[in-house]
Image: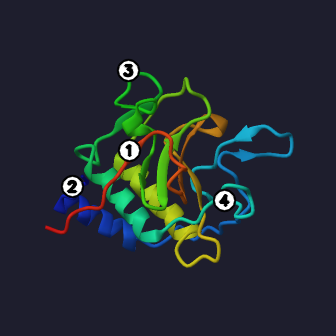
């Protein structure tokens, strides 16, 4: 059951009204992107890359479902402003190999943090993850003809070893592991 705290809801409300970065998103990126030499690259920090809607298995994301997932990210890990280490080992604060951290999903929306280099560790805040997911939602889903989602870089690394956040559509069979959320109560 998803429990929404007032403070977390206020943080998310602020994220929802922040102006977008103004960068143009081109719906040609795949997460992670594949360049002409067929090698993988992760997104640049300030750029949001929208998924290519014509790729197989790409599904539309539902805006309200994504709001629930983003609110969960803010409210479920304690203080969302506390810097946390992310990586793929038990030695970090957020071990991305653990099922509860692999991705967060509700209805027709999934959000996750990944890195192509599984040895990499970086430090950022859960509010940074939520803000990045919100930018992707604004630039690649809300009001778009093909609301399929996208990716954006996060953290302090430079180049191809950086972490990225992805937000995208999901079907009931699209998630094999992770945190599947239930609808929050309106108490």
Q: Nearer the viewer, mark 2 or mark 3?
A: 2
Q: Marks 4 and 1, how far apart in space? A: 22 Å
Q: Marks 2 and 3, how far apart in space? A: 27 Å
Q: Which residue reaches farthest front?
A: 173
Q: Marks 1 and 3, how far apart in space? A: 21 Å
Residue labelled with disc 1: 179
Residue labelled with disc 2: 3
x, y percentage for residue 23? 61, 67
Mark nearer the N terminus (2 vs 3): 2
Along the viewing direction, whichever of 89 and 169 lies nearer the viewer: 169
x, y percentage for residue 141? 55, 69
Residue labelled with disc 4: 51
Along the viewing direction, whichever of 56 and 30 lies nearer the viewer: 56
Mark nearer the N terminus (4 vs 1): 4
Q: Nearer the viewer, mark 3 or mark 4?
A: 4
Residue labelled with disc 3: 91
Q: Element at badge 1? A: strand
Q: Which of marks 4 and 1 is in front?
A: 1
Task: Give the side of residue 128 with respect to residue 27, left or right.
Answer: left
Marks 1 and 3 in Cβ contact (< 8 Å): no
Marks 2 and 4 in Cβ contact (< 8 Å): no
């Amino acid at each position: 059951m998803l429990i929404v705290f007032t403070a977390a809801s206020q943080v998310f409300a602020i994220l929802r009204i922040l102006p977008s970065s103004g960068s143009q998103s081109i719906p040609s990126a795949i997460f992670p992107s594949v360049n002409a030499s067929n090698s993988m690259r992760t997104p640049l920090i300030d750029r949001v890359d929208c998924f290519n809607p014509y790729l197989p298995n790409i599904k539309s994301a539902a805006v309200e479902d994504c709001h629930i997932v983003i609110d969960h990210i803010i409210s479920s890990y304690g203080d969302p402003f506390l810097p946390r280490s992310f990586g793929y080992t038990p030695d970090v604060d957020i071990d991305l190999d653990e099922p509860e951290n692999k991705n967060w999903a509700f209805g027709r929306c999934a959000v996750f943090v990944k890195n192509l280099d599984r040895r990499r560790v970086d430090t950022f805040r859960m509010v940074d993850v939520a803000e990045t997911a919100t930018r992707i939602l604004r630039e690649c889903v809300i009001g778009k003809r093909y609301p399929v989602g996208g990716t954006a870089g996060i953290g302090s690394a430079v180049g191809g070893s950086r972490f990225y956040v992805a937000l995208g559509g999901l079907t009931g069979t699209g998630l094999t592991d992770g945190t599947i959320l239930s609808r929050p109560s309106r108490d």
